[in-house]
Image: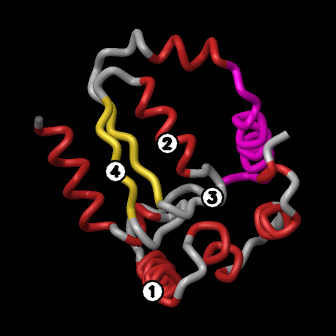
Amino acid sequence: MDQRATDPDILRHSLKDNPGPEDYLFLFFKNTPTSQAAGKEFLQRLGQRTTGPDAPTSLATRDHQLTAWSEWGITDKSKLVRLKSLFQPVLVADGESDILMPVENSRLLAEHLPDARLHIYPDAGHGFLYQYAVKFGTEVNTFLDR
């Protein structure tokens, strides 16, 4: 089984019914001063949002996501072979220190997709898109405009 599914620190932070800022910082941002500072800035921005808030997720949703997350580590080479038949362009992005979906998975995905563009963000974890919001948004727009 994938180490992520049994890592006590990851489980302790991800299985809380009411996660707090320290949990989000641990799970989504690399444990460096710059990444943690970016995480705190993101949490402040998130708290300032007054219109169009996202609907809260349920514990059942969290549990389904954790099941899918745990099962992703079980290698099924037939699924990788099937990726070769997807010819539409795909943007694959990740943080170089993602503890929830390791960057090796993103590299593997991009390697098996015929028209993939891979971008790995430095000093970042699973929350790379929040840490590099403007840069990632620009990259998404550029990718969609091509």
- Dot 3 or dot 1, earlier in sequence: 1
Q: Quadrant of the N terminus?
A: top right
Question: Which SS type dominates the magenta stretch?
Answer: helix
Q: How dense is the environment of label 2, judged by Cα within 10 Å: few (below 14), some, or many (20 and up)?
A: some
Q: Is residue 91 left or right of residue 95?
A: left
Q: CA distance from mark 2 to mark 3?
A: 27 Å
**Residue identifier under label 2:** 106
> What span is colored magenta in the figure?
56-76
> Which amino acid type corresponds to the residue marked 1 in the rendered image?
Thr
User: Is residue 23 placed above or below 52 in the rendered structure?
Assistant: below
Label 1 sits on a secondary structure element that is helix
| Mark 4 burial class by Cα count in 10 Å: few <14, some 14-19, many 20+ | some
Q: Is residue 74 magenta?
A: yes
The residue at which mark 3 appears reads as 56
Horizontal relation, residue 71 to residue 93: left or right: right
Q: Establish if 38 lies above or below 58.
A: below
Q: Position of residue 78 (x, y in %)?
A: 63, 12
Q: Which residue is mark 1?
A: 34
Question: Can you identify the residue that label 4 sits on?
Answer: 119
Rendering coords of residue 18 (x, y %): 78, 71
The percent position of residue 99, horizontal first and vertical second, equals: 65, 60
